[in-house]
Amino acid sequence: MTVAAEAIWLAPEPGLRASWRRFRRNHAALAGLVLVSVVLAAALFGPSVAPSDPLAGSLDARHQGISGDHWLGTDALGRDQLARILHGARVSVLTAVLLMSIILVIATVVGVAAGYAGGLLDATLMRVVDVVLAFPSFILALAITGVLGVGLDKVLIALGAVWWAGFARVIRGQVVAVRERGFIDAAEASGGTQLSIVRRHVLPHVAGVILVLGTLDVGSIILALAGLSFLGFGQQPPDPEWGRMLFDAKPYLQTQPLEMIVPGSAIAITVLGFNLLGDGLRDAFDPAGSAR
């Protein structure tokens, strides 16, 4: 979990319209929204408009530069780089977004349960979180992947097993702060059940924080996924994936740098887009905090 994500504060509830107005005035946030939208559109629809089969290569076309036939060149096996980038986006981006959604669900359940219930349940869950956070996330995920074996599914399990803990701790802190507010006491006094109070009063007050947490850390998930694939644990050849494309191009860095620049730039632009979008959402939900 990133340092920026751990620094999220309890955001006030200014209203969606006011938040949207602040977001629209943030040019960096709008740039991030555009980048993320383009990347997601490429991941969803790019494979259907890809110029060629990402697995089809030709030794006569290997290591070609940018041309009319190959807009981003070809790799060591003569496969079109643009086609592989578009197909690889489904793994590198959509998989990361889906994994982040699952992580947020797990972290929200744990964080809300610990923060609202308190007592023994809170202490037990937070000790589990402390144990997970005692190890660097990527190193622990690498160790789990080494035990489970290679494959994209193994990498996703490993990342999910370690990434939820930091979010759960932050969400728990926000829930504790909300629980101390007067309207929670009023809802309890009026006979509301714990489940209804959490659903109607607690979750709406922490939803903005959860959204910002997830958006800011999607970039970290993408980097971790690419890093594990670069090390050979993730997506296996010949299927395209951005981290794996970096690994395949590594031997040709000095002679054919374009083959590493293309997937590296795709990763960098995507991570930048999610970071700008997350920062913009944070400032929109908490205008006072953006000045701190």
Image (tube, rainbow, N blue to C red):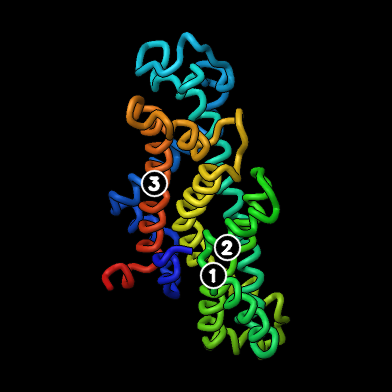
Nearest to the observer: residue 131 or residue 126: 131
Marks 2 & 3, CB-CB < 8 Å contact: no
**Quadrant of res 159:** bottom right
**Residue 177 at x, y = what percent?**
51, 83
* Residue type, mark 1 in image: Phe
Residue tagged by mark 3? 273
- Secondary structure beneath dot 1 equals loop
Q: Amino acid at mark 2?
A: Leu
Identify the residue at horizontal 37%, vertical 37% (top origin). 265
Q: Are marks 1 and 2 in contact (CB under 8 Å)?
A: yes
From the viewer's perspective, is residue 114 above or below residue 11?
below
Expressed as whole percent of the image width and height from the top left, the position of residue 213 reads 48, 62
Left or right of 122? Residue 12 is: left
Q: Earlier in the sequence, mark 2 or mark 3?
A: 2
Quarter of the rendering occupied by the C terminus: bottom left
In space, the residues marked 1 and 2 are separated at their CA atoms by 6 Å
Mark 1 lies on residue: 135
SS class of the residue under badge 2? Answer: helix
Of residues 18 and 251, the one drawn nearer to the viewer in this rendering = 251
Residue shown at 44% from the left, 70% from the top: 6
Q: Residues within 10 Å of mark 1 (few under 14, many from 20)?
A: few
**What is the spatial separation of the Cα atoms under label 1 and label 3, in whole angstroms?**
28 Å
Q: Label 3 sits on what residue type?
A: Gly
Q: Earlier in the sequence, mark 1 or mark 3?
A: 1
Q: Tell me the CA gap for discs 2 and 3.
A: 27 Å
Q: Residue at x 53, y 63 (%)?
A: 137
Q: Dot 3: few (<14), some (14–19), or many (≥20) neighbours within 10 Å?
A: many
